[in-house]
Amino acid sequence: MEYFLELKFEDSNYNALIHFATTFLTNSEAEGKLFVEELLSAFQRRKVMILSYSYNRIDNNPELRERMYEYHDFYLNRATASIQVEQFHVENPNQEKSLWDNLIGKFFEGEDSTANIGNKYEIPVRVVDKKTRNPINSEFYYFSVEQLIPKG
């Protein structure tokens, strides 16, 4: 299954508004929902203000898929920076805690305190100054999130 995900949020550290959009593949609707929940949790751990998000399945509608890829191409041409998404596979992760806090907590509880390193992605984003709406490029903007995925 193929999805298109769009997320808009405010990064108060840079006083910036960020527009994040990407496609992703899953094996089921439940897996797609879980993926989005894990990714949203990663952003929330970074204390950003999520303004809006949506994700839509696009592989079951050829016209919608074509239109969304046109939109995505337009979006990519306007991207000014990128966000690094690092995936880590952890046994029953607490999505409210960072990778470090999860592993330390598990260590002291005598549980499996290891994480398998997953994929790392650089997702193009459009970043603008919140006040002036002037673009902010990658020379001045850096952001990364840890997506915690349950082992299994």
Image (cartoon, grey):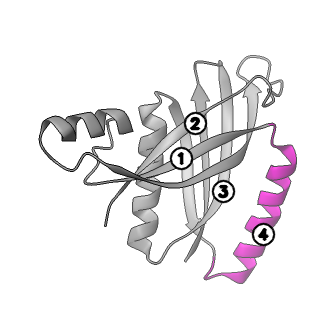
Q: Nearer the viewer, mark 3 or mark 4?
A: 3
Q: Amino acid at mark 4?
A: Arg
Which element type, helix, strand or loop, lies under badge 4? helix
Image quadrant assignment for residue 13: top right
Question: 95 or 135, which is in the foreground?
Answer: 95
x, y (%) of residue 24?
59, 65
- Would you say the residues marked 2 and 1 are in contact, meaning their CB atoms lie under 8 Å apart? yes
Question: 123 or 58, which is in the foreground?
Answer: 123
Q: Earlier in the sequence, mark 3 or mark 2?
A: 3
Q: Earlier in the sequence, mark 3 or mark 4?
A: 3
Which element type, helix, strand or loop, lies under badge 3? strand
Q: Residue at x 51, y 29 (%)?
A: 48
Which span is picked out in magenta? Answer: 59-80
For the residue carrying disc 4, how many other residues have a C-alpha within 10 Å: few (<14), some (14-19), or many (20+)? few
Q: Is residue 98 visible?
A: no
Which element type, helix, strand or loop, lies under badge 2? strand
Which element type, helix, strand or loop, lies under badge 1? strand
Residue 144: mark in rendering: 2
Quarter of the image containing the N terminus? bottom right
Q: Earlier in the sequence, mark 2 or mark 1?
A: 1
Image quadrant assignment for residue 17: top right
In the rendered view, tell whether residue 47 sits above or below residue 26: above
x, y (%) of residue 141?
72, 26
Q: Residue at x 44, y 77 (%)?
A: 28
Residue underneath mark 4: 67
Residue underneath mark 1: 86
Residue underneath mark 3: 22
